[in-house]
Image (cartoon, rainbow, N blue to C red):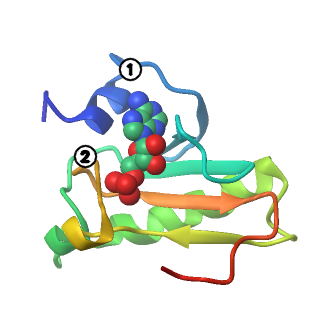
Amino acid sequence: MSDCLFCQIVAGTIPSTRVAESENALAFNDVAPHAKVHVLVVPKTHVESANQLDETNASVLGEMVLLAQQVAQVTGVRESGYRLVMNVGADAMMSVAHLHLHVLGGQALSGRLG
Ligand code: AMP
């Protein structure tokens, strides 16, 4: 999708600080971090959100979690712990309509989920 922000980051037409990559997923630093470590993991192919996953494309989610593990390793939070967050839709305040996993860590995170 040519007008999708994260598709343009995957294509390299919008700059990002890449942290890790796998065949079908890319990890890059969040531009407005909410924690010392805040990395986004996205599928390289456009999927709007978890609501659009189905039998044909859901396997990318496993690949995204494996890439998040790599992110945790290279950013040094794999042992200290980290939070994986996925917003879906308006009430979750999803702001970019391209499936993404937030990897948050590097500090003690709030105990609150919402
Ligand atoms: P969400 O609110 O779950 O949709 O998360 C979208 C995230 O994308 C936010 O945390 C933003 O800070 C982040 N973001 C927006 N634009 C960029 C960008 N150009 N590069 C990296 N992260 C971005």
Residue at mark 2 to residue at mark 1: CA–CA distance:
14 Å
- Residue 82 quadrant: bottom right
Within 10 angstroms of label 2, few (less than 14), some, or many (20 or more) residues?
A: some
Choose the circle earlier in sequence order: 2 or 1.
Answer: 1
Q: Is mark 1 within 8 Å of ligand 1?
A: no
Say if mark 2 contacts mark 1, CB within 8 Å. Answer: no
Which label number is shown at residue 109? none
- Residue 91 quadrant: bottom left
Quadrant into which the N terminus falls: top left
The picture places residue 28, in percent across and down from the top left corner, at 54, 39
Q: Which residue is mark 1?
A: 12
The picture places residue 50, in percent across and down from the top left corner, at 25, 71
Disc 2 element:
loop
Within 10 angstroms of label 1, few (less than 14), some, or many (20 or more) residues?
A: few
Left or right of 80 on screen, residue 102: left
Name the residue rendered at 85%, 54% in the picture: 76
Disc 1 element:
loop
Left or right of 89 on screen, residue 82: right
In the rendered image, the vertical position of residue 110 relative to residue 107, given as above or below: below
In the rendered image, the vertical position of residue 49 relative to residue 6, given as above or below: below
The picture places residue 67, in percent across and down from the top left corner, at 57, 57
Left or right of 57 on screen, residue 99: right
- Residue 44 quadrant: top left
Name the residue rendered at 54%, 82% in the picture: 113
Disc 2 marks a residue whose amino acid type is Thr
Which label number is shown at residue 45? 2
Left or right of 32 on screen, residue 60: left
